[in-house]
């Protein structure tokens, strides 16, 4: 089984271009199911299960208060694995072929308001040294480009073109996209690079965003930074890099950007992924509608 999973890992990385974190999550779900089988179904191998055994695992997960969203993700991992086993002809029937995902409530992402973004730039005190300018740049890049946290962390210096005012981002499945930069962002990058060059040691010179020790910054560091700065201007429960990405998309749509353009900037494969950002622009649309429609006058 282990050799089959290793082959599956290689398939996800080399052929599907999944990130290592995604691959680890998929494999963890598969091993979790195998652990359940070992305990409850006389060590039946994952490759040899029938759907009722999977269904019984789903019941156990739900009884352990695992959310429907998390259960669906685990089953999605299994489904992907079985598709691979079909591909290499290790099985002839996918036991999840007729499985229907559990119903989930759609989570409404609440973006930061334009005022909250204005406040975080105007009322936070950013020191004029390396850390202060870097922290401001991280917030600026999230809000003015809409990039993901992993894309921010892995943004290389050579993919920042200050002359053309663009950055090249490597997104999910190694898909590249070009994102324009605003003049204010370009100026901040220039200031940051001056400070960056004064670091005593630079261990990850290819990366744009560094820690004060010259290392590549971590995901947890970036999350804490966003949470800390926005705690002073927002009462929202969730304050994260993803909320900033959501704010980027929502504010563009509120101010007249078309959905296709926002889709390209975000790096979504389809419009359906981008449409989750349109709900919060509905308030602005209603306002325009009510002010403009003759029947409301």
Image (tube, rainbow, N blue to C red):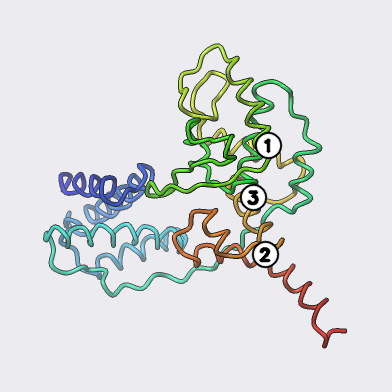
Say if 137 sits above or below 65 in the image.
above
Which mark is first along the chain, 2 or 3?
Answer: 3
Q: Gap in Å between the C-alphas at discs 3 and 2?
A: 16 Å
Percent coordinates x, y for residue 41 in the rendering:
20, 59
Outermost front residue: 163
Work out whether 10 lies above or below 132: below
Front-most of residues 201 and 190 = 190
Mark 3: few/some/many CA within 10 Å (<14, 14-19, 20+) = some
Crowd rating for badge 1 (residues with CA inside 10 Å; few <14, some 14–19, many 20+)? few
- Locate residue 43, reporting x and y percent: 17, 54
- Rendered location of residue 217, percent (x, y): 52, 29
- Look at discs 3 and 2 and give the one toward the viewer: 2
Q: Secondary structure at mark 1?
A: helix
Q: Is residue 152 left or right of residue 50?
A: right
Give the residue drawn at x 45%, y 26%: 206
Q: Residue at x 24, y 53 (%)?
A: 34
Tell which circle, 1 or 2, labels the residue nearer the N-terminal end.
1
**In the visual, does 141 lie left or right of 285?**
left
Q: Please tell me whether mark 1 or mark 2 is closer to you in this view.
A: 2
* Badge number at residue 228: 1
* Kind of element beneath mark 3: loop
Residue drawn at 40 percent across, 63 percent down: 72
Return the residue at label 2. Answer: 280
Viewer-proximal residue among 178 and 63: 178
Quadrant in the picture for residue 165 = top right
The residue pinned by badge 3 equals 238
Query: Front-most of 61 and 158?
Result: 158
């Amino acid at each position: 089984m282990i050799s089959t999973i290793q082959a599956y890992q290689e398939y996800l990385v080399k052929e599907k271009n999944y990130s290592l974190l995604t691959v680890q999550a998929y494999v963890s779900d598969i091993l979790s199911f195998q652990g359940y089988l070992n305990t409850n179904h006389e060590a039946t191998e994952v490759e040899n299960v029938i759907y009722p055994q999977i269904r019984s695992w789903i019941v156990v997960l739900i009884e352990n208060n695992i959310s429907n969203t998390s259960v669906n993700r685990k089953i999605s991992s299994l489904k992907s694995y079985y598709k691979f086993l079909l591909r290499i002809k290790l099985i002839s029937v996918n036991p999840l072929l007729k499985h229907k995902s559990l119903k989930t409530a759609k989570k409404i992402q609440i973006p930061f308001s334009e005022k909250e973004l204005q406040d975080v730039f105007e009322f936070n005190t950013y020191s004029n040294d390396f850390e202060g300018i870097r922290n401001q740049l991280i917030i600026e890049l999230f809000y003015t480009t809409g990039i993901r946290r992993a894309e921010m962390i892995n943004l290389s210096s050579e993919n920042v073109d200050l002359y053309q005012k663009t950055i090249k981002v490597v997104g999910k499945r190694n898909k590249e996209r070009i994102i324009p930069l605003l003049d204010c962002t370009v100026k901040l990058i220039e200031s940051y690079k001056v400070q960056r060059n004064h670091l005593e040691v630079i261990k990850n010179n290819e990366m744009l965003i560094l820690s004060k020790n010259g290392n590549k910054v971590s995901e947890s560091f970036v999350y804490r930074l966003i949470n800390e700065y926005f705690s002073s201007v927002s009462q929202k429960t969730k304050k994260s890099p993803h909320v900033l990405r959501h704010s980027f998309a929502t504010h563009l749509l509120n101010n007249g950007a078309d959905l296709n353009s926002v889709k390209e900037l975000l790096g979504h494969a389809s419009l359906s992924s981008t449409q989750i950002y349109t709900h919060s622009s509905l308030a602005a649309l209603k306002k325009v509608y009510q002010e403009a429609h003759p029947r409301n006058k």
